[in-house]
Amino acid sequence: MALMGVQLVVSLLAVSIMQKMAPHCSFARWLLCNGSLFRFKHPSEGELCALAGKQMSSKTSRRDRRQNGHGEPKPLTVPKDIDLHLESTPVNVLDALVLRFFVEYQWLIDFAVYATGIYLFTESYYFVVDASKEVNIGAIWCVLMVFFGLRTLHVLMSHYFRSDEGGERSVCLAFGFLSLLVAMLVLVVREDYLEFGLEPGFTSVFDNFEAFAKQQGLEWSVPFTKLGVKLGLAILCAFLGALLAFPGLRLAQTHLDAVQMNAERPVIQILLHAGFLSPLIILVLWVKPLARDFLGNAPMGKTSVTLLSSSAFDSVRLWTIVVLCVLRLLLTRHHLQAYLNLAPKWVEQMKKEAGRIAAIDIQRKVTRVYCYLTVVTLQYLIPILLVLFSTLALKSLGDYSWGLGPETPGVTPASVLPTAPPALPRLEDEDDLEDMEEDIQATVAHLSEAFTAFRAVLTPIFFRGVFAFLTWWVAACQLISSLFGIYFHQYLMQS
């Protein structure tokens, strides 16, 4: 039996289409260049001179000054309170070529689109065909998407560490240490309050691996390993907190500006607030007394009513997270336009100040806002994609269901590890074709054995704990950093 079958064929086809179609058809490029986003052009020196009531010196006069030994002319300065209004223009494909990290942005977003398509196909395939013995390719794409998203955030954070200014580096380190402290507190909370399933998952893996280690003649120390795993998990949480520091701070700024930009559209404002508070809703979904216990035994006077069964609650939780992520994805344009509006906002703030400013500084400030558009887009989209694809991986690898039907039997870890299959008989008089067929069969048998051993050690209970905690922790980090960003932009920046 093939290990992957139809899923592998579709996956390879998706990879080929993604590689061939990227230069011609890209969702990431369409997201920025569909005409709905407007950037602001920087004013030329001639326009600034006209607004300041000056006459701009020609290139000939500048050359004559250098020849006469007067050196370079002084940089053009204009009063800060000039009547400057920036000209807006839609973002087009040619404009996108100068954006920072545009290649990384385009590849990651396109990969997320194809990963979503592969996942939808895999779910449909599993619904129609009993493919429980095959490798879930959709889950692999989801895990890869999580990995590539974290890698892109690491690239962006390393850019802050390489900069000459140390403020960004200090912010990342501060949020990293804060996340380490919060993670150590969260990991000691009992499963009765935060139902990640880490303890049952680790117990399942340790028991199965202990049986496998004894079978191989190896020594295995479970208590020491549990302590080491939890310590490593806390360090990983600190790293994730540092990665998500600036995305949360940027989200707070774009949220405030987007709400102000849509002051006359109350429905959009409600959706923006709902999207901003969605990480808080995700956190509550794993607080057992507030979520599962409340819906399982809802108080109705002197009696209690079961609103949702345990399996139905798991499905509702998955659907809730997916809907919240889709809502935030639909609000992307409002956040990006709010960021682009920082250029005229800065100009209006400059007009309220006294003194003069160099024309080149005005041009650099306006241009810099647009050049970092893809960075801001990645900082907004990656945390959403991390939560979304972690949830999808949680559903597939954790053996959950999208349906709200009756409760199915619980998932139990496999207790029997596979043994090595007997060697295939070989005859001395076989020809080369038969030898090749037997080699292929032996390779497939060994791969099947390795896959079976992998599934016996890493059970669905383990994947439930890992991806539930990852989903919850990404939402927690974004909530902490975004709330701090709200406090910073609302109060510290105003003082």
Image (cartoon, helix red, strand yellow):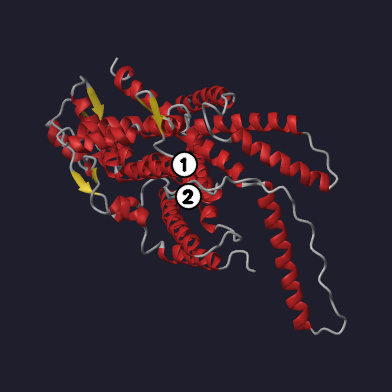
Q: Could you tell me residue 488's position as x and y percent? A: 35, 21
Q: Which residue lies furthest to the front in this view?
A: 302
Q: Residues within 10 Å of mark 1 (few under 14, many from 20)?
A: many
Q: Could you tell me residue 216's position as x and y percent? A: 83, 48
Q: As shown in the figure, which amino acid type bears the numbered disc 2?
A: Ser
Mark seen at residue 374: none
Instruction: Decide if residue 327 is on the left or right side of residue 383.
Output: left
Residue at the spot x=15%, y=29% of the render?
82
Residue 462 or residue 92, whichever sits in front: 462
Q: Residue 314 carries which label?
A: 1
Residue located at (19% from left, 44% from top): 88
Q: Which residue is drawn at 44% across and 34% down?
A: 296
Q: Residues within 10 Å of mark 2 (few under 14, many from 20)?
A: some
Quarter of the view holding residue 424? bottom right
Residues marked 1 and 2 touching at CB (< 8 Å): yes
Q: From the image, which quarter does the N terminus lie in?
A: bottom right
Q: Is mark 1 on a helix, strand or loop?
A: helix
Tell me the kind of residue under disc 1: Asp
Q: Is residue 59 visible?
A: yes
Q: Position of residue 401 (x, y in %)?
A: 48, 50
- Residue wearing tag 2: 401
> Which residue is rendered at x = 62% and y = 33% of the image?
199
Marks 1 and 2, how far apart at CA:
8 Å
The answer to whether residue 54 is visible is: no
